[in-house]
Image (cartoon, coloured by chain):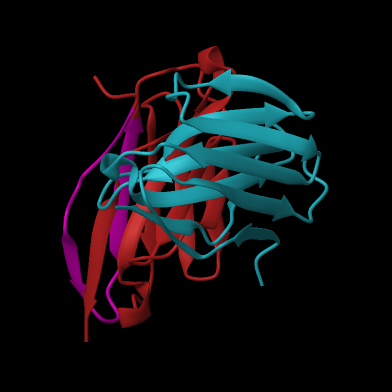
Chain colours: A red, B cyan
C-alpha cells in the first residue's frame, strides 16, 4: 500500500461547480498534510496546510482532515478554468523523520 | 514573488559536462531540499539539509553532489549525467521537518 494515495483522475467539473479531491494515507503517525497545485511545466505551489482534525477554509478552498479515517480532502468551490492543474496531496511521515510523502496527484480540468 | 530562487531556469548539458544548480531561500528557514520530478510524476526527494548538515540522502547516484554553503544556499553539482536524468529539479525550504515546504521555480535539465 502506498503511503499517500490519491485518485489519479482526471477529474472534470464544469465552471462554477465544487471540485472534490481526496487523499488517504497509511501511517497513523503522520502529522501534517498539505495540498499543492501544480500547473503544467511549473513548480508545486502550496495552497493549503492542515495539521489537526476538522476543516480549514481559505477563500474558495477548504481542506478537511480526518485522522481516525486517515483521509484528507480538498474542496474547491466555484471552480474556475484557472483552477485546472494537477493537485498534489502530501503528508509528513513521523517514522521517516518528517519526510514529505507525495501522492501521485490528481489532474483537475474545469470546463467553461 | 517566490522567496525560493533557483538558477538557471533551463540547462542543457552533455554527458561529460560538469554543471551546478543553485538555490537560495530568503525566509530564514533551517531545512532545504532537492527534489527531482519527471513528467506526470510527483516530486522525488533526493537530499535534505537541516542546519546545513545532510540529514537524508535517498540513495541518489554519486553523479549528483549536494553542497550547502550556508543556511540560505543550496547547490547541486552535476557530473557525468545520463539522459534519464533529464527532469525538473526543484529546490524547497521549510522552517522544520513538519512544516510547509515552499518550492522554487525549478531548473529544467536536459541531458544529451
Answer left or right for B15 relative to B30.
left
Residue A62 in percent (x, y) is at: 47, 57
Residue in the image at 64% along x and 51% along y: B22
Q: Compared to B48, does B57 lie above or below?
A: above
Residue B90 in percent (x, y) is at: 51, 49
Residue A61 in percent (x, y) is at: 47, 63
Question: Magenta residues: mostly which secondary structure?
Answer: strand
Q: Quadrant of residue A18?
A: bottom left
Q: Compared to B100, does B62 lie above or below?
A: above
Q: Magenta stretch containing residue B65, yes or no?
A: no
Residue in the image at 30% along x and 71% along y: A84
Residue B25 in percent (x, y) is at: 73, 53
**Which residue in the rendered view is the most extreme toward the front?**
B16
Q: Quadrant of the N terminus of chain B?
A: bottom right
Q: Is residue A73 visible?
A: no
Answer left or right for A99 relative to B110.
right
Residue in the image at 79% along x and 28% along y: B51
Q: Magenta stretch containing residue A13, yes or no?
A: yes
Count of numbered labels shown in the rendering: 0
Q: Nearer the viewer, residue B4 or B64?
A: B64
Q: Compared to A90, does A43 lie above or below?
A: below
Which segment is the magenta one? A4-24
Amino acid at each position: 500500500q502506498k503511503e499517500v494515495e490519491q485518485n489519479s483522475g482526471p477529474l472534470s467539473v464544469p465552471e462554477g461547480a465544487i471540485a472534490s479531491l481526496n487523499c488517504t494515507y497509511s501511517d497513523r503517525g503522520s502529522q501534517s498534510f498539505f495540498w499543492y497545485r501544480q500547473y503544467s511545466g511549473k513548480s508545486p505551489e502550496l495552497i493549503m496546510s492542515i495539521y489537526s482534525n476538522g476543516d480549514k477554509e481559505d477563500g474558495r478552498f477548504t481542506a478537511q482532515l480526518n485522522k481516525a479515517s486517515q483521509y484528507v480532502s480538498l474542496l474547491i468551490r466555484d471552480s474556475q478554468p484557472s483552477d485546472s492543474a494537477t493537485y498534489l496531496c502530501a503528508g509528513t511521515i513521523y517514522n521517516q523523520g518528517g519526510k514529505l510523502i507525495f501522492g501521485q496527484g490528481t489532474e483537475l480540468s474545469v470546463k467553461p | 514573488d517566490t522567496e525560493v530562487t533557483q538558477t538557471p531556469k533551463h540547462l542543457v548539458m552533455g554527458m561529460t559536462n560538469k554543471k551546478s544548480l543553485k538555490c537560495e531561500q530568503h525566509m530564514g528557514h533551517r531545512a532545504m531540499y532537492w527534489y527531482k520530478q519527471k513528467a506526470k510524476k510527483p516530486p522525488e526527494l533526493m537530499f535534505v539539509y537541516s542546519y546545513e548538515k545532510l540529514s537524508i540522502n535517498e540513495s541518489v547516484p554519486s553523479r549528483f553532489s549536494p553542497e550547502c554553503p550556508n543556511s540560505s544556499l543550496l547547490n547541486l553539482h552535476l557530473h557525468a549525467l545520463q539522459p534519464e536524468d533529464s527532469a525538473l529539479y526543484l529546490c524547497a525550504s521549510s522552517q522544520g521537518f513538519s512544516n510547509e515546504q515552499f518550492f522554487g521555480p525549478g531548473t529544467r535539465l536536459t541531458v544529451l
